[in-house]
Image (cartoon, grey):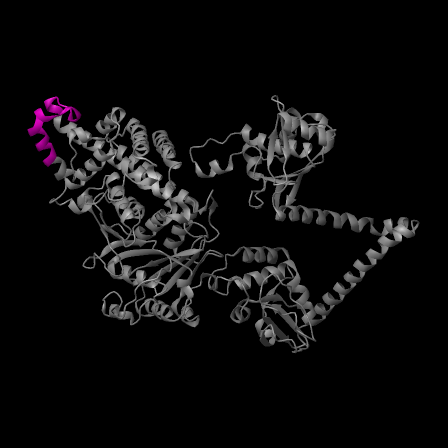
Amino acid sequence: MIDEHQFELRKQLWKITNHARGYMHTHKFREYILGLLFYKYLSDNLISFANKLLSEDGLNFVDLDEKNKEVIQALQKESIDNLGYFIQPNALFHALTKDGQTNSSIIEKLQTILFEIENSSFGTSSEQDFYGLFNALDFNSDSLGLSPSQCNELIIQIMTDLDVIKFDFDSNGSDVLGDAYEYLIGMFASSSGKNSGEFYTPQMLSKLLAKLSTVNNNSINSVYDPTCGSGSLLLQVAKEAKNPHIKYYAQELNLSTYNLARMNMIMHKVNYRDFDIKQADTLESPQHLGLQFDAVVAAPPFSMPWAAKPELLKDERFAEYGLLAPKTKADFAFIQHMLYQLSDNGTMAIVVPHGVLYRKGDEGHIRQFLIEEKNCLDAVIGLPANIFYTTGIPTCILVFKKKRLNHKDILFIDASQGYKNGSNQNYISEENIQSIIHSVVQRENIKNFAAVVSVSELAENDYNLNISRYIDASPQAIYLQGLKEQLQEFEPSLLYPYTQQILPLRKDDNVKTFENALILPKILGRKPYVNSNSFSCIKHGGFALLFDKQVINSEYLELFFNSKVGQSILEDCASKSGGTMKNLNLESLKNNLIASIPSLDIQKACVESNRTLNTIRKKLDDYQEDIIFRPSFSKELLIRLDTTSQYVEKADYEEQLLQKIRVGENAGTEFKETFSLDVRRSQTDSSYKLKKEPNIEESSLKTLAGFLNSSGGTLFIGVTDDQKIKGLEKEFAIFHQESADKFLLHFKNKVKVMLGESFYPFIQIDLETIQYSTVLVVKCSRANQPCFLGKENKFYVRTPTGATDQLSGREMWDHLRVKFQ
């Protein structure tokens, strides 16, 4: 939870960055904003430090000049010993900003001052921590402006805005400032996306890694990150370790990011003596090989190419494995390097792509060695997709410990479904983190979430660590589980033991014929079928499953796998194939394809029933013809079909609504998650007080007015923009005493006040149950007169793109003339 001071500081800093947005891309002006903020921090921090030393003499550091030369020299020594740097009073941030108000150019002076700050540490123990800190800041760059005067104007503007901010270096002020700096880094990463988001690990993922590397360990004196980026992960581990004297070690290849990490440390009040961050390629030029660390964490670049030189097989980090990670994928090289740097009682947590879990060849050999010979892999944790700024692929965390005397098994956790939707990517919530850590501590089997798997079982699976082999947390699996609970007769059995043969089919297999065979196209979405003559329609490959006709009727399986539940099973089967493409393969069919296998007579009855249903469907079409050409027949038909139609109508209506939702938002369909509640803020801001939001309510009413003034449409309230059915139960509970009727009354009153009762005949308002959630469905037809919203009489229309636009003036007049004549 952030306090008001933190919130205001964050808001102020982010607002300042907008001055540079029109001049360059986010990932470029990041260096300038963060660099200037860091310069201000160094200045204000030095002022605070120096004034404490000068307090007894009644002096103020900013007022010192040539007359106080000896005092300045004494302060310089104290400052370098304690802070690691020094700035002359006339070179402080505020002094230079003030100079910029009257001076036509301060660019050269600024560049000189920053160089002098770095140079002040030359020859001292802080030299390596301050050397080259401002190298990435070229204030003469064209990206700052087309002319020197434009560059100067922009820099002065940013410095003037920053100068207003007051830093509090007492109590927890430095934490607030460090947090604000971290917030800015995160915002830059989010804005940059794939351009340069790689330098920052999302905060909640950092928190999870930090907790995993420190849980049940109260003796963490050092933390190491071989690909540290901005250093946020190091700081998060220190926070979880609760050791104020922890030492930080890291390495980073990218120069500007390396500088950013050092600035981040200093802004978080980490003394220069307590961190050692080096710039170099970790795999080819490791800088800390003589040391081992209690917590080792990283989110290295996924599957990046590396040298993999043969001479590295003599390197102690890789020698015992006998093989190197392939040149095209360095994932296991990072794992081997980090494990080498881990202390005997330490814990290591690394984020890797899923390919690390199942790829064969040299990677498979290294994976087996880690499990079988070293017994150091402690847990595999599947993460949600799209939680990184740089990629949307699903990833996982591997947790390693060198001494696992009590364990000869591995804990698997599938947390892939545990996330919340953010604006640009998904994020892991505090509740998700607590669930994962609780499971790591308890180390117990939890259905659809966690499984403790023996090494012998892993060996049977050829050391394939694909999480779905051991835990089934996929949406399809949850759906199937729910179906099993509802349908008592549905007892799925593995289909492989019933097959006489499974034959892979190629697209040129157009002459093969089989009896009692089910054909499964390899690509999902193509329907399974029974065909005993030819397979020319297999254009992309598939599989023929042959059955003994005394046990299985293939026509029954055709029915089964073309049903909703059958399609879900095929999707689930494909998701367990281990690759990124969701296609069926032979292994997944053998190990995962299930079906309901009743007795043969019931199977035949199902086939016959389906044939009868098809006959009825055809007959119903004939009845429709009869109604037209034999009107007297309709009375008799009405009696026969009345009861049936009522039953079918209800089920069919829900399917119609679902179909509208699946299509998504358009000119005639709009989704709103709630009517009154700011859902996103209630989920992300713990200080937010739950209250009815008039602006959110008005957003729904705008849509209705737009439908009435256009060609009509349907508003779903309780459905998110990405078509997820969330329902309104939370809104009922918070605002309407858990009463759907009270909510409905509130909604109708709002329509009455804001739109007017005269429009009721054109609006149908219903609460519907869709997939077990209560959703408000509001259907509008085009009104016979214009609808104006609220006291302001605003006029809205619905556009073909699915937007609701406000019209006025000539545009409104033209619309009224065409629609309402």
Q: Is residue 754 left or right of residue 424?
A: right
Residue 598 in percent (x, y) is at 66, 68
Identify the residue at image location x=56%, y=36%. 731
Task: Name the image quarter holding residue 98.
Answer: top left
Q: Is residue 277 above or below residue 376?
A: above
Q: In the depicted view, which residue is nearer to us: 297 or 410?
A: 297
Q: In the depicted view, which residue is nearer to us: 572 or 352?
A: 352
Task: Name the image quarter holding residue 555.
Answer: bottom right
Residue 787 visible in the shown view: no
Is 276 colored magenta in this rendering? no
Is 71 colored magenta in this rendering? yes
Residue 171 visible in the shown view: yes
Q: Is residue 202 left or right of residue 595?
A: left
Which part of the image, by quadrant, shows the C terminus?
A: top right
Q: How many marks?
A: 0
Magenta-colored span = 55-77
Residue 227 in percent (x, y) is at 30, 53
Task: Name the image quarter holding residue 296.
Answer: bottom left
Q: Is residue 73 left or right of residue 629?
A: left
Identify the residue at image location x=18%, y=31%. 91
Q: In the depicted view, which residue is nearer to us: 74 or 550?
A: 74
Q: Is residue 435 above or below residue 168?
A: below
Identify the residue at image location x=44%, y=63%. 466
Residue 268 in percent (x, y) is at 26, 39
